[in-house]
Amino acid sequence: MTELAYPEPLTDGVVRVRPWHDGDLPCVEQASEDPRIPQGTTVPVHWTPEAGRAYIARQHARLTSGEGWALAVADQRTDRAVGHVNLMLRPQAGVAGIGYWIVPGARRQGFGSRAIALMTAWGLGAGGFARVEAWVEPDNVASQRVLEDNGYLQEGRLRSFLTFGTRRADVFVYSRVRAIAAG
Ligand SMILES: CC(C)(COP(=O)(O)OP(=O)(O)OC[C@H]1O[C@@H](n2cnc3c(N)ncnc32)[C@H](O)[C@@H]1OP(=O)(O)O)[C@@H](O)C(=O)NCCC(=O)NCCS
């Protein structure tokens, strides 16, 4: 099993991407109230502080199990967590998948786009990946916009690719790849 370690907090001066801690429970609670976030993540559908703490523990377990990096997106000024971004190893060598959410009250302020920028730059740089990809449902315009803002290209549509409860969903595949040196 690959042994992973958290990077130093990633920041652009506005957003800070750093490990989760129990002080972030209000963020998990707000995420659990969103109709979309608990569907595609392990954010609890029914909020309790215990369920919130278990969510945070699961994010750290992703690192120790070698699955990938699951980090909080925080406001640099206050360190208040407003969302989540992760980079998970795919079975193919050098490929990672990116996932993200921002709590409803903090959307349209650039947190999502900045977090994706930081995580992608780290993944294709110090993280050592050649490709970072995302799977997005065709009706999820917000998610497609933040990827396109960050230079991700849409590559195609995978039919009936994901399952949400009993519902099956198509996804658009997006990716960014490491620049290949000329010559
Ligand atoms: C997708 C998501 C992370 C975007 O986060 P965000 O912090 O609101 O995004 P940003 O503020 O960085 O938005 C960057 C740009 O994306 C576009 N955008 C964001 N939300 C949008 C929306 N609902 N509709 C249309 N465009 C949108 C805009 O161009 C925006 O810039 P602008 O508001 O200045 O015009 C957020 O909507 C979310 O958490 N959704 C639910 C969970 C989810 O779908 N996760 C992804 C699963 S693949």
Image (spheres, helix red, strand yellow):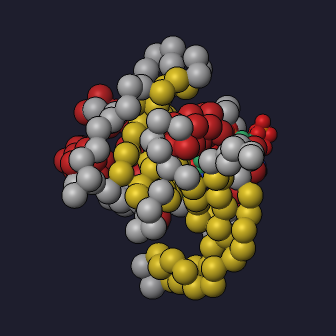
Image quarter in which the N terminus is found? bottom left
Where residue 108 sits: x, y (%)? 69, 38
| Residue 158: quadrant of the picture | bottom right
Say if 124 sits above or below 35 in the image: above
Q: Residue furthest top?
A: 77
Where residue 171 sits: x, y (%)? 63, 73
Q: Is residue 66 visible?
A: yes
Task: Judge from the rendering whether residue 155 lies leftward or rightward of residue 29; answer left or right.
Answer: right
Task: Judge from the rendering whether residue 108 lies leftward or rightward of residue 31; answer left or right.
Answer: right
Task: Judge from the rendering whether residue 21 lies leftward or rightward of residue 76; answer left or right.
Answer: left
Say if 157 sits above or below 41 in the image: below
**Residue at horizontal 37 percent and vertical 46 percent from the top:** 69
Where residue 29 sits: x, y (%)? 38, 44
Where residue 148 sits: x, y (%)? 75, 50
Q: Residue furthest front?
A: 183
Say if 106 sits above or below 166 in the image: above
**Residue at horizontal 33 percent and vertical 35 percent from the top:** 6
**Residue at horizontal 58 percent and vertical 37 percent from the top:** 121
Between 135 and 126, which is closer to the camera in this rendering? 126
Q: Is residue 103 visible?
A: no
Between 127 and 54, which is closer to the camera in this rendering? 127
